[in-house]
Amino acid sequence: MHHFMLANLLTEPVGVAHYMAVGAVLFVCGVLCMALKRNALGVLMGIELVLNGANLNFIAFGSRFLRGEGQGLGLDGPLMALFVIVLAAAEAAVALAIVLNFYNNYDSVDIDRADQLQG
Amino acid sequence: MGDGIYWPTFFFLLFSALACGFALAVVFSRNVVRMAFYLVMSLASTAGLFFLAGEDFVGAMQLMIYVGGTLVLLIFGVMLTSQKQFVEMKTPAGQWIVGLVTGCALVALLWMAAFETPQWQPISRAEAEAVAVQPTATPIGVALTNGRVDQLDQPDETLRGGMSSYLLPFEIVSVHLLVVLIGAAYLARAKRRSPSAAAPG
């Protein structure tokens, strides 16, 4: 299977697997962002990257060009991707409001300062 | 096979390199303002990948909602909170090592899973060139309100009922957006700070 990765690159079409590989990189970058950034806005950007990686997979499964006519998810893929985009926008709005509230109360966006629930 | 460069693949490689490169730049950049810019570039390159997969409507929505809306929101957040000590925040080296090892392991696992599955491998060049290009805005709009134009000939009678439309999720998402709008405005409203709340906890 690995000969698809490099040998026929540039002369043959790409498949769902290639899109999933890109989606995996975006997903892992997002997870690392969420885990490693201390700035709350950096964590939010990580969430956007994760959702975007998932979106890429939905698009790949729904596309007719990657799996052939009638083989993919059809319209389910792009519709799910649209819902994910809308929910990501909603999530960003609420999360940003929470971050701004936290900044107003603590004069900081360092998520390590949000430790009041430690008990 | 072997008759010249297949240009969609070339552009796939270009856009995927841009998307992955800028996503890595988001992770490795310390400056939160630069992170926001790299994220814009990464999401815009992803929109290019959507166009290449034939989903023009979702690609346009990605550019308009994500790059035009969500990212502007994030950049406003960056600007509102960008005091000097928050622009560059350092993460301890130990966390970097653990994170990078975990991330590389996860990428390797996902790549192996993707490339070992036979159903996800590319179709031949002749097959891909035979697929007719058609705009997706109308089918998506019809699927949101009336029914699934791509599933009208679903042979299974019991499955056909579930293929009706996405009207209910559409309504739920609409109400959800309204609730989020009110909730975010309520949460982020300017209020007078009481002296006790100003003390850091």
Image: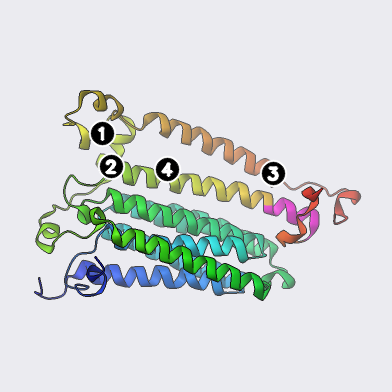
Label 4 is placed on what type of residue?
Answer: Phe
Q: Quadrant of residue A112?
A: bottom right
Label 2 is placed on what type of residue?
Answer: Leu
CB of mark 1 within 8 Å of CB of mark 2? yes
Category of crowding for the residue at label 1, using alpha-carbon neighbours closer than 10 angstroms: few (below 14), some (14–19), many (at least 20):
many
Label 3 is placed on what type of residue?
Answer: Leu
Task: Residue A109: say if magenta.
Answer: no
Residues at marks 1 and 2, CA–CA distance in whole angstroms: 8 Å
Give the label, 3 or 1, closer to the camera.
1
Q: Chain of mark 2?
A: A
From the image, tell me which residue sits under label 1. B148
Residues at marks 3 and 4, CA–CA distance in whole angstroms: 24 Å
Instruction: Tell which of A79 and B187 is nearer to you.
Output: A79
Q: Residue at x 43, y 73 (%)?
A: B21
Label 1 is placed on what type of residue?
Answer: Arg
Q: Quadrant of residue B200?
A: bottom right
